[in-house]
Image: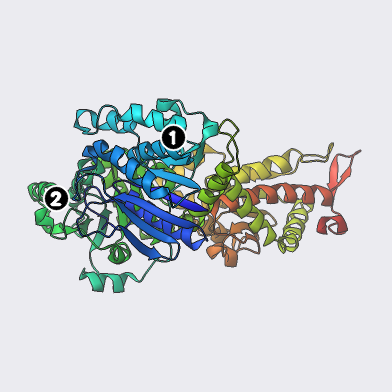
Amino acid sequence: MRLALISEHASPLARVGSVDAGGQNVYVREVASNLAAAGQSVDVFTRRDSETADEIVEVAPGYRVVHVPAGPPRPIPKEELAEFMPDMSEWMCRFMEGNPYDLAHANFFMSGLVARDLKRSAGLPYVVTFHALGAVRRLHQGDSDRFPAERTRWEQMVIDDASAVVAECPQDEADLMRFYEVPRSRIVTVPCGVDTDVFRPMGRALARARRGWGNDEWIVLHVGRMVPRKGVGTVIDAVAELHRRGMSDAYLVVVGGASQDPDEDPYVRRLMHRADELGISENVRFAGRVDHHLLPQYYGAADVFVTTPWYEPFGITPLEAMACGLPVIGSNVGGIKYTVRDGETGFLVPPSDAAAVADRLGELHDLPWLASALSENARRRAEDLFTWSQVTGSLIELYERVLGGETRDEPARSPIFGRAVEELSEVLARAGDLDRALVTATQMIVSCLQHGGKVMLAGNGGSAAQAQHLAAELMGRFLLEGRPALPVVSLTTDTAVLTAWANDVGFEDVFSRQLEGLAQSGDVFVGLSTSGDSENLVRAFATCRGRGVTTLALLGGDGGRMADMADAAVIVPSRNTQRIQEVHVLLVHILSALVESAVSIDRDSGTTRRPAAVPREAHQ
């Protein structure tokens, strides 16, 4: 395909970090680069904002940036660019007369206006990604929003003529339907991404040495544009609260600004003054604008990443932090509540709530094991769901659908659905050896039941639900009617015990405490965990040792610590939490069927008899 990406103010060649250069610039740059790498021909059209800019810049094979003369060749705030869009449309129309394109992808509403003009003058179909919606911006910024009042009307015009609208997250999709009445069938959700080859874990000591930071400092990092809605003041207030609580080793590093010299940025100077008023100026460092290739060093040297905007259409910096293995504390808004899994990869907090941020920072400061677990989960989630190659693959699928003639009234295929099915299929294809492990697990459970023992199960979150699921199937029935109930107990269901012990003693022992009271020699304990490193399950397995309790683990990834502690382990070969949980559902059903097939029924006495062996059919 020959593709025209339009991004009127966000050039892929701009230095990211200034007021009008942020996530959209990264998005356009990475999408264009990855589309070209995938064999597409891509031109990015952006407004010429410098007299020295060449008209066409060859960035890579198949990828060019075209500078369009529209308005004076100097930087102009994006809020003041709308009047130059007719000039941009006219110039691009002439340029395309000898350079036909198959499809345009507009980024931002003003680029959408240009794409709409090109469709009407040249018949060029287009899709649009807004990156931010005027109705949502006005809702949060009120009179401080300096875009023209006509913005929402223009956005509606762009939507009406588009072949499809790209939402970046579920909240973006919901806002399009709520404020612009866009039918769900016309929306395709494709998230932003992160370059996991650039943003990846690195040695903290090495990163700190390169930045000149002390190894005894606990570093909170913020990266983003220095504008009020990003909520940097909330992070400063939170770090001040940590110091009031006695955490004198807490430091904040703020990256971003209009200049590499923080003193030249008026808003940064206001933030400096705020830190000084709070008495923590020695513990807050403003790095100014940082070259993009240096950002991994900042992420690698930090202990936690915090971003607390009032609202955020998507937010790429949390993904960069996650890919580098940092737990993320973020506002429960927009794209952040999609990328950050609360309690799994970091924490979500209300916007503008410095006390809530300080509480979560305090937990990570005082519980290094928790920070380590969130860090690993964050890295896995970024790698599994948000790479630019995945994003580009979804966009190519959308472009092909539009060019293939699907009408906008047809239900749109979801790239997320297709990608999830593909990922699950790949995991199942690698899971061919699990049948042997399941037969071993079945033999353990059947032997326990036929000797008068009981089965106890536990897990956290989704794994807790699966523990209860398996207990229900075995206690009740799965397929075989008329069999008696089996003695199976889920340790996740007694809320009084769980909350009392967690509140009075600690959540790490909620399962081991129950095992101390319930487990007897000959019993089986089954622990379910996607990581294999959940502390309360690790302690539960340790409790089973020396008590004659056989242990079975349903795990994911490399199995974590629990793989070595269990008498038998069934490990799903994936690091994607969602895919592991989905396969665990399948394993629960298979294990239920295997146990039933291995337990014979004496219908007259209503008792079970131990079979000679697990039947051959169980292996098939």
Is residue 492 among what the camera can see?
no
Q: Marks 1 and 2, how far apart in space?
A: 44 Å
| First-in-chain label (1 vs 2) | 1
Look at discs 1 and 2 and give the one toward the viewer: 1
Q: Quadrant of the C terminus?
A: bottom right
555 or 442: nearer the eye?
A: 555
Q: Quadrant of residue 205?
A: bottom left
| Residue at disc 1, secondary structure | helix
Colour mapping: rainbow
Please tell me how many numbered marks the rendered image carries: 2
574 or 155: nearer the eye?
A: 155
Residue name at image x 33 percent, y 52 percent: 25
Residue 435, position in %: x, y? 75, 60
Taking the image as shown, residue 468 lies to the left or right of residue 139, namely right
- The numbered dot on residue 268 is 2
Taking the image as shown, residue 162 lies to the left or right of residue 326, namely right
- The numbered dot on residue 333 is none
Q: Of all residues shown, which one is farthest toward the right?
A: 604
Q: Quadrant of residue 466?
A: top right
User: Callout 1, which amino acid?
Assistant: Arg
Q: Quickly name the residue at label 1.
A: 120
Residue name at image x 32 percent, y 48 percent: 360
Residue name at image x 22 percent, y 46 percent: 232
User: Callout 2, which amino acid?
Assistant: Val
Residue 534, position in %: x, y? 50, 56
Residue 325, position in %: x, y? 39, 61
